[in-house]
Each structure stands twice: as C-alpha cells, then as structure tokens.
Amino acid sequence: MAFEHKSVLLEETIEGLAIKPDGIYVDGTLGGGGHAYEVCRRLSNKGSFIGIDQDAAAIEAASERLLSFGERVTIIRSNYCDMKLRLHEIGIDKVDGIVLDLGVSSYQLDTADRGFSYRADAPLDMRMDTRQSVTAKDIVNGYSEMDLFRIIRDYGEDKFAKNIAKHIVAEREKGPIETTGQLAEIIKQSIPMKVQKTSGHPAKRTFQAIRIECNRELEVLRDSLDDMIDILNPGGRICIITFHSLEDRIVKGIFKKNENPCTCPSTFPMCVCGKVSKGRVVTKKPVLPSEEEMEENSRSKSAKLRIFERR
C-alpha cells in the first residue's frame, strides 16, 4: 500500500515558512513527504532539506517521492525530539525553517495491522516507531483504572472516560485485551446509545488518547520546542500543525514564552530578569483550514497552524 497522506494546510505552511532558495529546511514529521516535496521544489542547488521520521514506512515512501531532488535531500530515521543532535551529527547547527505536522498519517490509520484504527480488527499496537517496546496493548492491559481514566479524560477529552476505564478493567480480568476490535467493542458498551448516534465513532477519542500515551506525543513536543527555536537562524521560521487542543495549547504557550520570556512582576518599571525575546509569534490566531479543504479532507477539521519567527 502506498504511503498516502494528504498534507493538511499545505499552502499555508509553505507560505508561512517564507522559503529562501539557498536555505536549510527540516521536516521533523516527514510522513509521505507532502510538505517536503513543496519545500524541495522551492530550493536552489545550494539549498538543502533534512527529513526526519521515526516510521520506517514513511522513510521509504518519502525517499522515493523526493528522489528527483538528489543531493539536496537527507533523510534520517529518528524522533524529532532528537533533531538538534541528529543535525549536529551531519554538521548542521542552524537552519532556516522547521515544519512539524503532528497528525497521525492517513497511511498509519489505514494500515490495519499497525493497530491505530478502530475500524479494522488488528493487534493493539499503535507504535509510530516499531523499535520501541511499549505498545497500546501494554497500556490497555497494564495501566491502573485511575491512569486509564486520566489519559482518556485528558488526551481523549471524553466525558465517559471514567466508565470506559471501568469497563476496560472489568473486561481484562476475564483475559487480556489483544485487538483493536475487542477494545472498540468494550468502549461501545461504555457509552450510552443515544450519545453514539450523534457523535461519531464511540472509540475515536479513547484510541487517540492511547496513541498519544503510547508515543509520548505531548511530552516529546513539550520537551523539544525550545531546542528547535534555538537552532533557527535569524528570520528563520518554525511552522507547527496540531490536531488536538492539548498540543495546540503547548505550542501556543511555548511560542508566547519565547516571544516574551520576561519574568519580572508587572509593577517593575523595567525588566531586570535579563531574559531576552527570541523572536515573534507570526500567527496571533492559529491558521485554520478553508471550508474547501475540510470538505475534501475530513481529517483536516481539527488542524491548527501556528508560526514563530526567530529574531
């Protein structure tokens, strides 16, 4: 199966990067190479592009898609949280632009045996990097009821989190929960029928929550944004597309802190903390997909793009 992934907010991201033909650009979530292709197309022979992804299937697909750009392209299998280190290893300390598209790719959702989707029965996996040991199955069968409740409530924003966690724990006492089908069925039983009729697939939020936990998506984002802003050249930009309110909140908060890091009390006549702004938030409000894009690609509906420029 081809690594298909419709890049969300593609034009807006490319425009937001303000690409310099001779610059160095990094995509930390390479996926099928949709954003990457458009970046590479705008680079001269002096420009360079580095694509990073932890998913072997993405690496393979993007390598093929970007083949025609030859020497300009370097592809690395890694998590974007190690971006600074990986770039340093290939002799790059500063870049002109960074893209992160934090959504799970269409390919990952549509490849049943990866265990991301509640629509097909498959082993409970959900690892973006198959080299990691913890799977969704470990979380579903190993976490306490309290921890399951917490992640389903916080990462899935599901108001039936308490009931879902209770049902999972009761069910696994009869035997381990092994597949996505089993889990989806348990979730269904936990949510009132009248709610199910009006609000999409009942398992959607819980599956999202378990995936975020399994891949430590929010911690990774929180722990690496400052580093990424640090490696930007003056005028360099970072464009981040989020699909979840908690991700968006992290990005918004860290961008704001980098724009105005001063910790002095508001009563002080002048700043004495010595913390200097690293740049400016380009997007005072997040850029949202157009009506047209949301119609064409339903997965873009919750997308938000935020952009920061280094001074």
Image (cartoon, grey):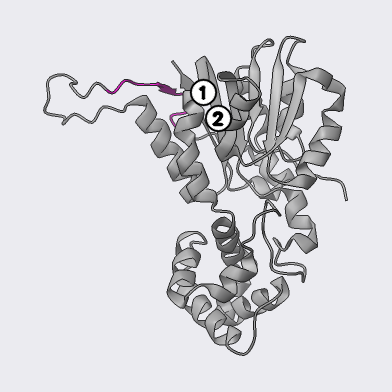
Compared to residue 280, the image places residue 134 above or below, namely below
* Closer to the camera in the image, 267 or 175: 175
Could you tell me residue 301's position as x and y percent? 62, 47
Choose the circle earlier in sequence order: 1 or 2. Answer: 2
Q: Answer yes or no: is residue 70 visible.
A: yes
The amino acid pointed to by label 2 is Lys
Label 1 belongs to which residue?
A: 231
Q: Position of residue 52 (x, y in %)?
A: 68, 35
Mark 2 sits on what residue?
84
Q: Quadrant of residue 5?
A: top right
In the picture, measured across the screen, residue 237 lies left or right of residue 132, that is: left
Q: Dot 1: what SS?
A: loop
Q: Which residues are magenta?
A: 275-285
Residue 199 seen in the figure: no
Which SS type dominates the magenta stretch? loop
76 or 252: which is nearer to us?
Answer: 76
Q: Is residue 9 magenta?
A: no
Q: Residue at x 82, y 28 (%)?
A: 66
Q: What residue is shown at x 61% (from left), y 20% (from top)? A: 92
